[in-house]
Image (tube, rainbow, N blue to C red):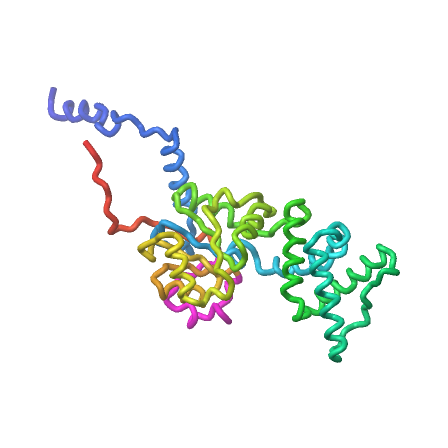
Amino acid sequence: MNLSDEEDSMKSLPTEEATQPQQSATGFDGVVRQERQRRKQNFGPNAKQVRKPNNILVDIYGVIAPWTFVTHLKKFAKDNIGDYVRQNWENKLTRTIVGRMWEQLKIDRKAGMNIPNIEEPNADNKPDEIINTTINGLQWVLESKYPALRTQMEKLCTDLWSNSFETGKLKADIYPDVIDAFHYWRFEEFIKIYSYASGPVEGQRQFLRTTAAGDLNRYIANGLNSSGGYKFDPNKFRGLLAALREPKPDNLLYITDDPRKARAAERVGIRTVIVNRSGSDTGKYDPKETNGMTVVTTLADIEFINDPNAYVIPQCC
């Protein structure tokens, strides 16, 4: 055998790489690998690479749901308060708020305030007349945003919305990119997700459970309440770190639509991503306001990467 024949025979032998068994894509690990490969290929040119956090804190309005849904909720309350009052007339909350309304309207009318001539029903009125007159009063209070009864009307509307969510009459609108992003964060990257809002946790969970796209709570570890007030105070975020028992603030990523909230979080070391749904560069999204911050127009443009400086456990054998 000459040299050229030997070379040809060597070429025909299977290489070490070819003789190695192909890594199976079956099983949990295989599915995760395939999902991550597919995901990486789908990121577009506008994707922003973000170091993978341990936990994600996400605002509801502006990130998960559009702010226009707030307007829808207010209109829904005005359109449905009549049916609600009729169905819940004997409810303690309803009767308490109705009594408070008539008492306040009477006081303000005597004080010379411009109160419409909606007379409080009396014992001589028929039950239907009493209810209809009460509904007229409540509708006026809602439409006029009557400040003296704001707290009471918020309670009434919250109960109305809660009942409507549970019966399926009302469903929360969410942005179309939310489901896929949540799946990526929770089930591909195994990051815990926490919703963050000024409302109670029970209300957040109900809202997320009754969206038009289905139940989002399967992705959410828990809800966090800002305990009233605005989220522009860095102390709010210090409290969140304590609640999550997170000793390293940069292990938490806060996703919001408001640069002011993001700045407050960054002051305590929390990393942030701003979601500018409109794509506008004016107002709160002026480049001067977002300078040095990570801004995306869709959740689909958030690409998580591993920390290159993180300690990697050596492979055995």
Which quadrant is home to the C terminus? Answer: top left
245 left or right of 131 in image: left
Bounds of the magenta span?
A: 278-298
Q: Which residue occupies the foreground of this view, 234 or 180? A: 234
129 is within the stretch colored magenta: no
Q: Residue at x 53, y 62 (%)?
A: 278
Q: Residue at x 46, y 71 (%)?
A: 286
- Depicted 78 relative to depicted 166: above or below: below
Question: 274 or 14, which is in the foreground?
Answer: 274
Q: Residue furthest bottom?
A: 112
Along the line of sight, which residue is nearer the eye, 211 or 294? 211
Question: Is residue 283 on the magenta stretch?
Answer: yes
- The residue positioned farthest toward the top in the image shown: 1
Q: Is residue 280 left or right of residue 53?
A: right
Q: Which residue is at 63% across, 51% downward?
A: 162
31 up-or-down from 265: above or below: above
How many numbered dots are placed on residues in this image? 0
Residue ranking furthest to the left? 2
- Picture coordinates of residue 299 (x, y %)? 47, 53
**Image-quadrant location for residue 81:** bottom right
Q: Position of residue 172 (x, y in %)?
A: 60, 51
Looking at the image, which residue is at 43% across and 44% down?
186
For the N terminus, give its image quadrant.
top left
- Residue 264: image location, x then y, percent: 41, 66
32 versus 250 height, above or below:
above
Instruction: Indicate whether 16 appears above or below 56.
Output: above
Q: Position of residue 247 (x, y in %)?
A: 31, 55
In the picture, measured across the screen, residue 72 lies left or right of residue 252, that is right
